[in-house]
Amino acid sequence: MKAADAPTAARRLAVADVGRAGVLRGYGVWLTAAVVLIVLPWVVRTGAAVPIMNQMGIAIVFALSFNMLLGQGGMLSFGHAVYFGLGGFLAAHALNLAGRGTLYLPVPLLPLVGGLGGLAFAALFGTFSTSRAGTVFSMVSLAVAELMAASSLIFDRFFGGEEGITTNRAKAPLLLGLEFTRDRQVYYLIAFWVLLAAIAMYAFSRTPIGRMANAVRDNPERAEFVGYSQRWVRYISFCAAGFFAGIAGGLFALNYEILTAENMGLNASGVVLLMTFIGGIGSFVGPILGAIVFTFLQSMLSDYTGIWLLYLGILFLATVLFVPIGMAGVLMLHAPAWRARRVGRLAGPYLVAGVCGLVAAVGVIGLLEMLHALVAADTPSGVRRLFWTAVSLRSVLPWLVFTGLAAAGALGLRWAGPRAAAAFADANRAGAGR
């Protein structure tokens, strides 16, 4: 008996060691994230860095909350910004009451008010919207978004009409003497709530209800068969997503000190869908990457071109057609090669494909910018500055050059793409073999 029990005890010890290593690794990830958030404003010291990082933090919480619906529960919502906006409006009104002395509400607690507001409305609208999944749920979410858009014009005392409502965080009571009058102070408050919300959403995904949300997404009939109500699982996930979307809305009200009906409209719901899908809905990190990339492009491109929305649309279209697993999915596909230390084999083929893609992108961007300049007629002199070079719109040469670059880059990608794919397959196959 003792000899037979020895292998079992050894296996138990091995499993326990693996479990402890996983827990320590998880704590290390969150501690690293906290350190990065603390030092980031001191590393990136450009003038617009802190406001952009504030916007990224809000987008991260918003995208992660949407991923609780789409990525974990399989619920495609076209009106998730409703809970973002309603939470933000409630937080803004609460901040105005605190500024007048009617309510004691320090600024650090403001996102919690938005979260509770988003939770309340999610609990209300979720009673009928989560009864069905798939297309029915998507259409109901769209109807709720249109309902709130109409309500914003009717209840103008709450929503502020077309001008929205404004607030002032400097008038709120202090907590431990902390003031939030500068962007860097607001950044650390947003970073705290981003880290707290991310940990809470990750923990929720590891709970039994979070696991069952995955089961209901994949096979609702089997979930019903083992004794779980798919409607209640969707409802609880829906309420949790509304709570964290409301937190993001509260952070938005705190950061910008103004909210309008557009913050809960279809445009905002479409933006969070783009962020989540570009980053990848198959993992927890995907929405974080998507929110960072999308916010950066939105902030940077708008300063250089008037058709930045077109470029974001092209990025989304390319993701849907060629990389449906998103940025995080692509990174995860390289995990076997990374563990086998064979990522170096991909450097050459990837570099060639990247150069070809860059050449094609320069050609396409040049053609689009020149075409936009002609249609918009915003350059009376006929000269447009592209890629640090003055380009004459009336000359044939620039059109030929950008067309040639686009064609050469496309042909190069057609040649380099299969070779990069073959190198990727070889690296992963070798890693799996090891």
Image: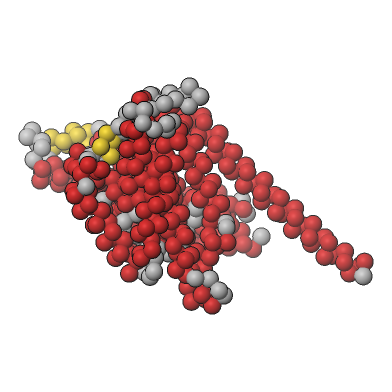
In front here: 375 or 347? Answer: 375
Q: Position of residue 165 (x, y in %)?
A: 25, 37
Q: Position of residue 117 (x, y in %)?
A: 38, 47
Estimate the x, y position of residue 167 in percent, counting from the top left: 30, 32
Res 52 visible: no
Position of 62 with respect to 156 (left or right) is right
Reply above or below: 60 against 52. Answer: below
- Measured as percent of width and height from the top left, residue 288 is found at 45, 47
In the picture, measured across the screen, residue 236 lies left or right of residue 46, that is right
Q: 183 or 275: nearer the eye? A: 183
Residue extending furthest toward the top: 177
Relative side of 25 to 292, left or right: right
Q: Which quarter of the figure has residue 396?
A: top left
- Image quadrant occupied by the N terminus: bottom right
The residue under the point 44% across, 25% down is 174
Farthest right residue in view: 2
Viewer-side residue, 183 vs 175: 175
Residue lying at 47% horizontally and 60% vertically, measured from the top left: 236
Q: Residue furthest left?
A: 380
Q: How many marks?
A: 0
Q: Nearer the viewer, residue 289 or 61?
A: 61
Q: Quadrant of residue 206?
A: bottom right
Q: Residue at x 39, y 43 (%)?
A: 114
Q: Is residue 113 above or below residue 205?
A: above
Q: How is the image coloured?
A: secondary structure
**Can the viewer see residue 166 in this picture?**
yes
Quarter of the image where the C terminus is located: bottom right
Residue name at image x 51 percent, y 58 percent:
333
User: Which quarter of the picture shows residue 112?
Assistant: top left
